Amino acid sequence: MAREAIDLTISGPPAHDDLAALRAKLWYPDVDGVLFDEAVRCFEQIAYRAALVMTWLAIAEGLRYRFEVAAQRDLELTSLLEEVAQREKARHAIDTFLLDKARKHELISEHEYRELAHIRDQRNRFAHPGGASPSRAQVLAALDTAVHIVLSRPAQHRTEWTAALVTRAATDRTFFPRDPDALRAYAQEIDPLLTREARQHLLRAAVKKLDELAADPARSDLAAKVAILAGAILEMHTALMGALDPAARLAARERGMALVCLRPEVFAALDGAMAGAALASVLEPPADANPGWQPDIRVLIAVQELHEVHSLPPVWAEQLDKHIAALPLNELAELDFPAGPLATRLIEEMRSHNWTRQNQACRALANLGPSWCSRLPEPVQEQLGRNVLQSAEATRRMPPGSSPGSASRWTSGPDGSCTGSPPSASSMSTAGCD
């Protein structure tokens, strides 16, 4: 049943107004329109038997083409198409096979399967000698069903495929590495190919996977990708948030749900109560928290990125600043904390007049490297470089016998000499950031 272009010599749209409107709904008109137009021409010539046969062919070929499109991303469907080819080579009918697989792989529902099977049975009845012929109304009904169930829809992916997609985002570092814009564009590209059930499955799988990833600091980059993917889908379908039961999940302090809600595109659609619940679940200590409790740094990164897009209310912004100030500088640098606040923290530490804090700041800056510095605005780069050089200059002027290893404070005397313990010049490498 290979698809071939057939010259129907149709000079214009179908004469029947309803059929013209149906044709306008074809998702792939260049492909599906070939057999649809032939069915219409037969209908207009009152060749109702031929019209019904061609309608079924349009359905079967439409299902096959949607499998072909989906197989470009779904390897399991590639094996299905190979089986179709083998059946055709052996001259076996594939009508029922395609219909059964369409139901299995969620292209059609159970009810829709029965409607299409009815058209198949009509084709079987009227395509053989017996004196029976379909009525005009039966052909029109068949064409309408063909378009609304198959020909007006794009190829669609299975729920299993969406689960595999989430797993890939959570495990494969080559999958859109450090390119959130490209990942969001990819989500927008695949969204029309997902059923509502597939989208819900993707979101539930993403929240569950984020709960797992949140426990492993080494996979924070993968967690970010999963959150971006889920956030992009929710931005396009905000009504699906209710299916995740966010209020109960946030009350239970489920980190996966919080990371999804803290995506800027998702947070913007939350009402005040839900937004507050999302922030409280990560910034406020739980009831059984130990003294000195601190939020997870990866969650703080998510809140800071949100704050840079949507300014938080002062009460939450103050809590965020307090938690960030309490974190060790090396942890902020190792986990690629947002560049602006990290640069501010580095400058504050270099201005502390405390050798230990200055040394840690300069080592962190050296580890971040020139590529990180290049992402900063030029005035901030200049400010960082000036503070590094001033610290190094103070070391050069340090009084004899002072100990760079001391953590005591040091200040400049009236005559320009230094007292206390300034940082070691060797530790103040700018790593190309001057």
Image: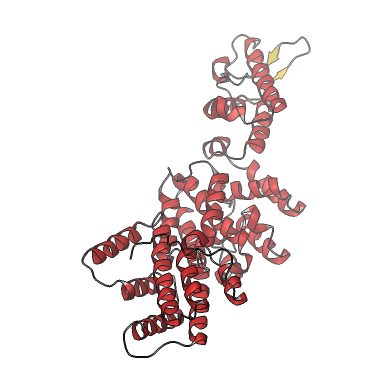
State the image coordinates of residue 49 (x, y, percent, origin top left). 41, 81
State the image coordinates of residue 415 (x, y, percent, origin top left). 77, 9
State the image coordinates of residue 369 (x, y, percent, origin top left). 54, 26
Query: Is 240 left or right of 320, judged from the image as shown?
Result: left
Which residue is drawn at the image coordinates 43% and 80% (left, top)?
A: 110
Image quadrant for the C terminus?
Answer: top right
Whether residue 391 is visible:
yes
Which residue is drawn at the image coordinates 48% and 86% (left, top)?
A: 138
Within the image, what quadrant is residue 90 found in?
bottom left
Within the image, what quadrant is residue 388 found in?
top right
Q: Is residue 345 or residue 197 the one in the foreground? A: 197
Whether residue 363 is visible:
no
Above or below for 317 versus 348:
below
Q: How is the image coloured?
A: secondary structure
Q: Is residue 8 or residue 146 the one in the foreground? A: 8
Which residue is drawn at the image coordinates 55% and 19% (left, top)?
A: 427
Within the image, what quadrant is residue 242 found in?
bottom right
Q: Residue furthest left?
A: 90
Above or below for 314 versus 24:
above
Q: Is residue 31 or residue 80 the one in the foreground? A: 31
Query: Is 243 left or right of 103, judged from the image as shown?
Result: right
Which residue is drawn at the image coordinates 47% and 65% (left, top)?
A: 8
